[in-house]
Amino acid sequence: MTTRRAWLSAGGAFLLILAAIAAPRAQTLQRGIYTSVLDKDGKPVAGMTAADFVVREDNVAREVLRVEPATQPMQIALLVDNSQRSSPNIRDIREACDAFIKGVTGAGMKNEVAVIAVAERPTLHVDYTADQAKLLKGAALFPQPGSGAYMLDGFYETSRAFKKREAPRPVIVAIATNGPELSNRYRDQVIGAIKDANASLHIVMVGAPPTDFTSNEGRERAYIFEEGPGQTGGRYDNVLAPTGLPQRLAQVAEELTHQYLVTYARPQSLIPPERVKITGKRDDLVVRGQPVKVSK
């Protein structure tokens, strides 16, 4: 009897070992983050490795697998405020558009840019193309007398279009003024659409930050301008002197064309994380990123 029990016990243990060997390992997924790394002067930093980054999902650290230059072409929506308030600065705005377009197209780059004006309503002036000459011609915008801006409508509609066309690396870059905002959009609606499209939002505003807090449209714009870029891996800049616009837009272009793709592992789960955050281990660098899906 004792021998039989010992045999059964040993046999059971053997079966457990076999089951453990045969059981599939917990599946992991790979996720990517298009990441900007800038020094104190706002210049892109080269030579970053997996050891330089920390990725957290809902405050849980994940394993960084690899870091490589981001080579996937971008689909960039350049939204320009050409409302009446833009009139005194329209020359600088045009030069800023030119500086940005030249920075992200040409020289073998395959990025596609669309030029969208937001006076009266979002209006497509140039559809997505890598043709630099066509873009430069289409970006020669004129201010619309008596008009206000529909920038938030532009953010929302552009994001919905990105989602519909399944753009692999969508980016929104906006040149804004402090004139009246007329869009009837709410913060959750706009920022939610940008996130749903996996887009990053970058805003360069001429003059002081938004000052209209008396109207609902103004309050929503102020919140979206303050929170939207940070929540989507983008940047927000105020340029007090309009003559500084071209240099700042060239800087945005340089940042976008020198990003990394940081790939990390996460366990498969029915509930996706609410927040993904990437940081650097060096305190002297600015690190910001836009989470995306990558192939396993």
Image (tube, rainbow, N blue to C red):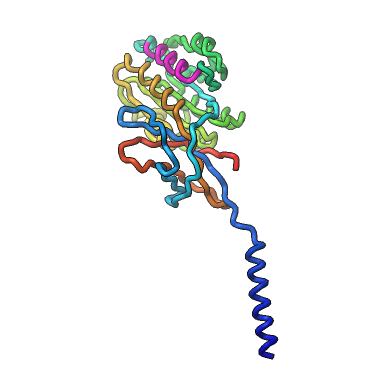
Question: Is residue 187 positioned above or below 206 on the image?
Answer: below
Q: Is residue 244 magenta?
A: no
Q: Position of residue 102 (x, y in %)?
A: 46, 15
Q: Position of residue 74 (x, y in %)?
A: 53, 26
- The residue drawn where x is 70% and y is 86% is 4
Please indicate, yes or no, whether residue 216 appears anywhere in the rendered image: no
* Residue projecting furthest to the bottom: 1
Q: Nearer the viewer, residue 69 or 85?
A: 69
Q: Which residues are magenta?
A: 92-105
Question: Is residue 4 positioned above or below 169 on the image?
Answer: below
Question: Is residue 172 positioned above or below 289 on the image?
Answer: above
- Indicate the quadrant where residue 128 lies: top right
- The residue drawn where x is 64% and y is 58% is 24
- The residue drawn where x is 66% and y is 73% is 14
- Indicate the quadrant where residue 251 lies: top left
Most frequent secondary structure within the magenta stretch? helix
Q: Position of residue 22 (x, y in %)?
A: 67, 62
Q: Nearer the viewer, residue 126 or 264?
A: 264
Please indicate, yes or no, whether residue 92 appears anywhere in the rendered image: yes
Q: Nearer the viewer, residue 125 or 110?
A: 110
Q: Position of residue 165 (x, y in %)?
A: 61, 29
Quadrant of the rendering where the N terminus is positioned:
bottom right
Quadrant of the rendering where the C terminus is positioned:
top right
Q: Residue 296 vs residue 178: left or right?
A: right
Q: Residue 208 vs residue 290: left or right?
A: left
